[in-house]
Amino acid sequence: MCKPIIIAIDGPAGAGKSTIARSLAGKLGFTYIDTGAMYRAVALWALRAGVDLSNMLGLERLAQEARIEFSGDRVLLNGGDVTAAIREPQVSEAASKVSAVPGVRRAMRDEQRRIGLKNSVVMEGRDIGTVVFPDAQIKIYLDADPGIRAGRRAKETGASVGQVAREIAERDHRDRSRAEAPLTQAPDAEYLDSSGLSPEAVEEAILKIVRQRTSN
């Protein structure tokens, strides 16, 4: 049996991680894991269950009990399709807070490792190469200019660029300053700035790295 290959893609919001990771997984025949969707699913459940976002023990309990599955492009929470619901603005905002809870991160980390030990995966998030899979064969830190990132996210959501820019700045601060698994570039990760690149160019750059790292 060949050891599963793990491609870890980390970076801030709006850098293009999800788009690139999904496409890469399709080309390589790997499983795509959107770790952000996992935190969004927990946040959605908290909102629906009326669990206060400051209730760290309550959020941790939800994360431990949540059954989150990926079926193609669909995200399932406890058997229900939540693919569209987890992309709602209020869920995005809640997910940013939920993902900062240490107990939630530990629960999601255990689940991410379980998936990655069984299959070759392209996994994207904030701490994949630093905490979840520090021994991943390929690590990418995907970044972009904050203005570019805000423009991309505004186009996706239909919100104003100014509003999204403020939200991204707040999200970046929370991600980089949290005590548990803050967003940072792994020492052995390849830094890739997507600001002036098309998705196709970013994908080709990463595929080149994959070929170099797996040639033996």
Image (cartoon, grey):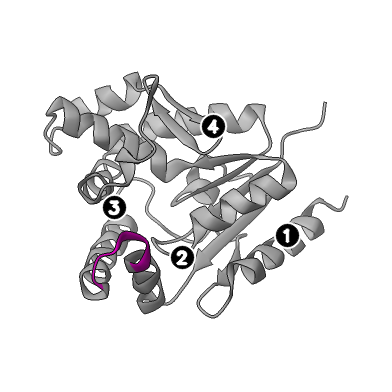
Q: Report the Cα–Cα distance between label 4 and label 2.
A: 24 Å
Is label 4 or label 3 in front? 4
Q: Which residues are magenta?
A: 155-160
Q: Indicate whether residue 205 is drawn in magenta.
A: no
Residue 15, numbered circle: 2
Residue 26 appears at what percent x and percent y?
67, 46
Label pair 1/3, CB-CB below 8 angstroms: no
Is label 1 or label 4 in front? 1
Secondary structure found at label 3:
loop
Residue 207, numbered circle: 1
Q: Which residue is denoted by mark 4 in the rendering?
A: 113
> Would residue 206 be found to the left or right of residue 84 on screen?
right
Residue situated in front as seen by the camera: 29 or 209: 29
Q: Which residue is denoted by mark 3 in the rendering?
A: 178
Q: In terms of sequence position, does the residue under pointer 1 or pointer 3 come before the other?
A: 3
In the image, what residue type sits under mark 3?
Arg
Q: Report the Cα–Cα distance between label 4 and label 3.
A: 21 Å
Residue 77 appears at what percent x and percent y?
37, 26
**Other-residue count near label 2 (Cα within 10 Å), few / some / many at <14 / 14–19 / ≥20:** many
Label pair 4/3, CB-CB below 8 angstroms: no
Label pair 2/3, CB-CB below 8 angstroms: no
In the image, what residue type sits under mark 4?
Arg
Q: In terms of sequence position, does the residue under pointer 1 or pointer 2 come before the other?
A: 2
**Other-residue count near label 1 (Cα within 10 Å), few / some / many at <14 / 14–19 / ≥20:** some
In the image, what residue type sits under mark 1?
Leu
